Image (tube, helix red, strand yellow):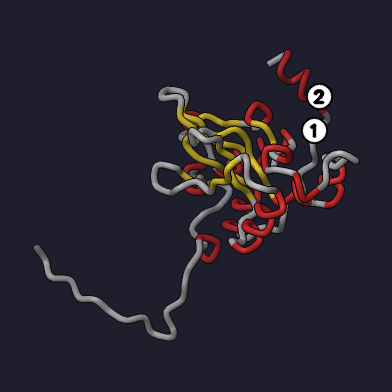
Amino acid sequence: MRKLTVYTLDQVDHLVQPAEFQDATLTSPALSIFTDFRTSNPMLLDADTNAVEADDMMRQEHSWLKLVVDRQQEMVGVLSNDHFTSQYLMQHVSKDVKAKDLRVADLMRPREAVMALSYQQIQHCTVGDVLHTLQQKGEAYCVVIDRDSHQIRGIISVRDITNRLHLSPVKIEKTPALLNMFDRMYA
């Protein structure tokens, strides 16, 4: 066994994050910007978590997106910081349901409404291909599924792409529901 030298941190040692590097472009392989759950733990929230507590947690963690899981740790949806806007919250509050009583499950985007790309597909495409697809579909993010093993393998977001590539934020226009229905019918 080798003997390793250990060091103390110097004042100049800086915590790095992926956005600080210039190693990805729109023509880079899509796998270079994909958060792979084989090597990175997904950011998770329990579906039963109080929504106000979840909002506080996500702010403290500087997180804008989390996968929502049930008691068996299976993904049941996705929660983003967009779900905590006053406009979105008002859609879920009524005279019988107060904002303080909402749970993550009440606000999340349900699993069936989350777009997915296949791992097999993104192995052969570029970052630009993924960004274009997300923009075209009006989605800020998508999960990546391994269709062979039936695993939710990771996640890709427009925000992560633009941060990593040092691009201006990209505005995602939601595709009207009727157009989504036609896309599914004629796909």
As drawn, 147 above or below 93 = above
Q: Are discs 2 and 1 less than 8 Å apart at CB?
A: yes
Q: Residue at x 63, y 35 (%)?
A: 77
Residue 108: x and y, percent? 69, 39
Image check: 53 left or right of 16?
A: right
SS class of the residue under badge 1? loop
Pick the front one: 15 or 20: 15
Q: Residue at x 48, y 33 (%)?
A: 72
Q: Residue at x 86, y 39 (%)?
A: 96
In what quadrant of the picture does the C terminus appear?
Answer: top right
Which mark, residue 175? Answer: 1
- Say few, some or many: other residues with alpha carbon within 10 Å of mark 2 (under 14 / 14 to 19 / 20 or more): few
Residue 167: x and y, percent? 66, 58
> In the figure, residue 111 lies in which quadrant?
top right
Image check: 78 left or right of 27?
A: right
Which mark, residue 77? Answer: none
Pick the front one: 151 or 60: 60
Q: Is residue 133 visible?
A: yes
**Mark 2: amino acid:** Leu
Residue under label 2: 179
As drawn, 105 above or below 5 = above
Image check: 157 left or right of 147?
A: right
Residue 58: x and y, percent? 63, 56
Q: Is residue 122 visible?
A: no
As drawn, 80 above or below 2 = above
Report how far apart the C-alphas of labels 2 and 1 lie in the structure: 7 Å
